[in-house]
Amino acid sequence: MNEAQRAHFRQILLAWRQELMEEADRTMHHLQDEVANLPDPADRATQEEEFALELRTRDRERKLLKKIEKVLDQIDKDDYGFCEACGVEIGIRRLEARPTADLCIDCKELAEIKERQLAG
């Protein structure tokens, strides 16, 4: 992967990280502003369910932020774009689709097959 490609992926990841951080701030303000002592139990339950859904979404995004930070560190160390399982270079098209990919398509498919076998 050349320097221009690494810079391209760095920009994508930085923009993605910024978007996730802004969304987390919006959620925090929304949760603070919307807290109401609703007298109707159904309204209160609906509000709590909405908050729970938002918090689950933010938790997934928090995990994604950790992956983004890890990938940015790999870019800095010139280690980005290589499969963690077999060491082969991950295809550009795969990285374009999922910039945080840490497995090549073959290793990812194998991992998914193993996961399905263990779950089934």
Image: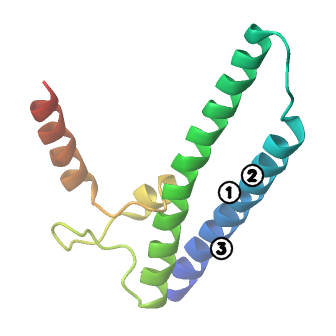
Dot 3 or dot 1, earlier in sequence: 3
Quarter in which the C terminus is drawn: top left
Relative to 43, does residue 108 appear above or below in the rendering? Answer: below
* Neighbours of disc 1 within 10 Å: few (<14), some (14-19), many (20+): some
Mark seen at residue 20? 1
Mark 2: amino acid: Glu
Residue appearing at x 74%, y 8% in the figure: 42
Alpha carbon distance from label 3 to label 1: 14 Å
Question: In the picture provided, is 85 more to the left or to the right than 67?
Answer: left
- Residue 36: horizontal and vertical position, in percent? 87, 30
Alpha carbon distance from label 2 to label 3: 18 Å
- In this rendered view, identify the residue nearer to me: 34 or 53: 34
Mark 1: amino acid: Leu
Residue appearing at x 24%, y 70% in the figure: 84
Residue mark closest to the camera, 3 vs 1: 1
**SS category of the residue bearing label 1:** helix
**SS category of the residue bearing label 3:** helix
Q: Are marks 2 and 1 in contact (CB under 8 Å)?
A: yes
Residue that numbered label 2 is attached to: 23
Mark seen at residue 11? 3
- In this rendered view, identify the residue nearer to me: 7 or 111: 111
Residue appearing at x 27%, y 59% in the figure: 104
**SS category of the residue bearing label 2:** helix
State which quadrant residue 80 falls in.
Answer: bottom left
